[in-house]
Amino acid sequence: MKILVTGMAGFIGFHLSLELARRGDEVVGLDCVNDYYDVNLKYARLNELGIKRQNIKENELIKSEKYPNLSFFKANLEDFDTMKKLFEAAKFDVVVNLAAQAGVRYSLINPHAYIDSNITGFVNILECCRHYAVQNLVYASSSSVYGLNENMPFSTHESVNHPISLYAATKKSNELMAHTYSHLFGLPTTGLRFFTVYGPWGRPDMALFLFTDAAVHDKSIDVYNYGKMLRDFTYVGDIVKGVIKCIDNPAGPNPKWNSKVPDPATSSAPYKVYNIGNNSPVELLDYIKAIELRLGKEINKNLMPIQPGDVPATYADVGDLVKDFDYKPNTSVNDGVAKFVDWYLDYYQIKG
């Protein structure tokens, strides 16, 4: 298949593009390579894919030097004219939209960045999929959409009408926008609510990176909610496997859908929402313990109250993944954290 992966220079987009290229799909990656976090890490990911930084030009398709079936296109999702030209020329079979302004806390500081990328950018994706005969759209949602919901484990079959960050609100909006296009234009759309993704090449603004960096440099870390935060930490390799299941199996209408008792996860249109999580919440202090075990040292912790926009716990019901694809993420936190720490030490050339 010919697949567009937006957010190729990002954490999940990099891993997905690599896996798709290795299995033989024709992959085109799109990214604006913004400076929300260290652009050198983003360019290093692209370099792993065979895209050299010095060869990248705005709005120009660059061929990989490692994978003949992979290319990169530097552009903004918000630039509708450029997006239309790309879709018209490329004729994609599938689009995977992973590009977004990420981060819960940053949405309190710079809300407009989330509207530009996550709302305007996403409607541009939908319009291009509609007009250029894309057969399947898979897009990233987030566990943050569950907001004030405390009914564990979180189920896609329950409503999510109480987000507590603008980031979460934009992701919920993406699901609503996708449903509209599925209903009006028959576009198959699958939304994936990712649960706290971690692993090698991870984002520097996320807890695992911050904690490991602090531990290596003998600094203290801020631990929110006094370490009692529960998270359904999900290894990036497991996330990628779930995304590929949805690439290969476009959403279809639910023949049993009842408009009098509407199921939020399905529709009479070709629309579906899944959770992708480890289905096994871990306390934040135990997550930190996994870093300490791998590094053989204790991290000094500043225990802090919960931050605005944060939820105290996440826990994914992945029953639909199991039912539809016979698939369930299964990488343990100790194994996944060790792989991240090994990558971190290698990337920064630190002796572990």
Image (cartoon, grey):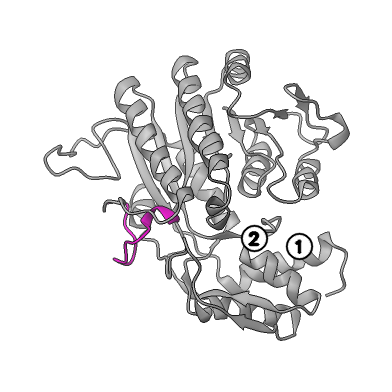
Amino acid beneath label 1: Trp
Neighbour class for label 1 at 10 Å: few (<14), some, many (≥20)? Answer: some
Q: Position of residue 197 (x, y in %)?
A: 56, 58
Q: Position of residue 11 (x, y in %)?
A: 65, 49
Tell me what residue is drawn at x 55 percent, y 58 percent.
105
Label 2 SS? loop
Q: Is 35 situated above or below 132? A: below
Pointer 2 or 1: first along the chain: 2
Tell me what residue is drawn at x 78 percent, y 27 percent.
63
Along the line of sight, the residue nearer the viewer: 335 or 221: 221
Along the line of sight, the residue nearer the viewer: 23 or 55: 55
Is residue 119 located in the magenta-colored stretch of the structure?
no
- Please say whether residue 98 is visible from this viewpoint: no
Tell me what residue is drawn at x 27 percent, y 33 percent.
253
Q: Is 283 situated above or below 17? A: below
Range covered by the magenta-colored residues: 143-157
Tell me what residue is drawn at x 38 percent, y 25 percent.
187
Tell me the quarter of the picture where residue 91 sits: top right
- Is 181 displayed left or right of 98 in the figure? left
Is residue 148 located in the magenta-colored stretch of the structure?
yes
Tell me the quarter of the picture where residue 153 sits: bottom left
Quarter containing the C terminus: bottom right
Amino acid beneath label 2: Gly
Label 1 SS? helix
Report which residue position mark 2 lands on. Answer: 199
Query: Which label was assigned to residue 324?
Result: none
Q: Position of residue 18 (x, y in %)?
A: 68, 42
Q: Are marks 2 and 1 in contact (CB under 8 Å)?
A: yes
State whether the magenta stretch is mostly helix, strand or loop: loop
Report which residue position mark 1 lands on. Answer: 343
Along the line of sight, the residue nearer the viewer: 331 or 217: 217
- Is 11 displayed left or right of 188 in the figure? right
